[in-house]
Image (cartoon, helix red, strand yellow):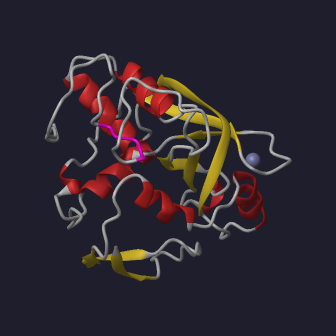
Amino acid sequence: MRVKVSAPRHGDGREESLRVDLPTLTTVRHYRPGQERDELMAGVPQTTACDLLSGTRADPNAASLGLVEAHDIHLEVEPHGGWTTKQQRILDQWQSQPALPLEGAEHAEAPPLEAPPYKARYSYRCASPSCNGHRQGILDWELTALQRNAKADGAEPADWIRNQFGRKLLAANRRQFLSLGNQADAAKRTAFSVLSIYTPRTRTGPERSTPEPSRTAPSSNPRAPPSTSPPRTGRRGAS
Ligand SMILES: [Zn+2]
């Protein structure tokens, strides 16, 4: 995509905090899931979670976004407990913004404002030789969308989370790359969260088959039901 950006408001000193001029958003090229996207992603510079953390400890305006490879990764799921007052206020502000003018109306399914039943975290080691491990919450909107779809199907959301964010994305024949980002609040910039997960298949690793060998996007797909559920087609509208 190509889009015009400008400096952030409110004196946010993080280099990556740019304001996006949405009407200028255009698609330059579409990369098909699989090899095309894998080759594109292979050119994205990587860092480590340890480096991101040490950077923000030294300077709150250090790199606030980064792609890191996770090793020995595990999923943890627990009841959500509801939004905090501050989170709810931020959500309210988001909802008052205009929808993204993306082709295909991808933004039509805006995240619901009610808290999802569960939250999830990944624990893992990054590529730093001295890494003692990380444990970071997953803020990927697909985690919320997946739970909404599970509830609409009368299924247990935690089962779907473990299936999609655990069994599928953490399969032995995939590598796990996490997009990490921190918060605007300068006092919390050393707390990074998982914004998205990219899981290309390994080319030389054991081809451990899963019940649903997928040719779809390497990222998680919230609309893919667990293999125990009947296949579903089409999109669900926002509830
Ligand atoms: Zn680390």
Q: Work out whether residue 36 or residue 68 is closer to the camera in this orientation and state it.
A: 36
The reply to whether residue 123 is in sight is: yes
Q: 238 above or below 37?
A: above
Magenta stretch: dominant SS?
loop
Report the magenta residues as a range.
Answer: 218-222
Residue 88 lies in magenta, yes or no? no
Identity of the residue drawn at 33% across and 44% down: 216
The quarter of the image holding the C terminus is top left
Q: Position of residue 223 (x, y in %)?
A: 27, 36
Q: Is residue 188 left or right of residue 16?
A: right
Q: Is residue 202 left or right of residue 91?
A: right
Q: Work out whether residue 170 or residue 158 is closer to the camera in this orientation and state it.
A: 170
Q: Work out whether residue 130 or residue 38 is closer to the camera in this orientation and state it.
A: 38
Residue 14 in which image quadrant: bottom right
Q: Position of residue 30 (x, y in %)?
A: 30, 66
Residue 220 lies in magenta, yes or no? yes
The reply to whether residue 81 is in sight is: no
Identity of the residue drawn at 68% across and 40% down: 71
Q: Residue furthest right?
A: 130
Q: Position of residue 101 (x, y in %)?
A: 20, 67
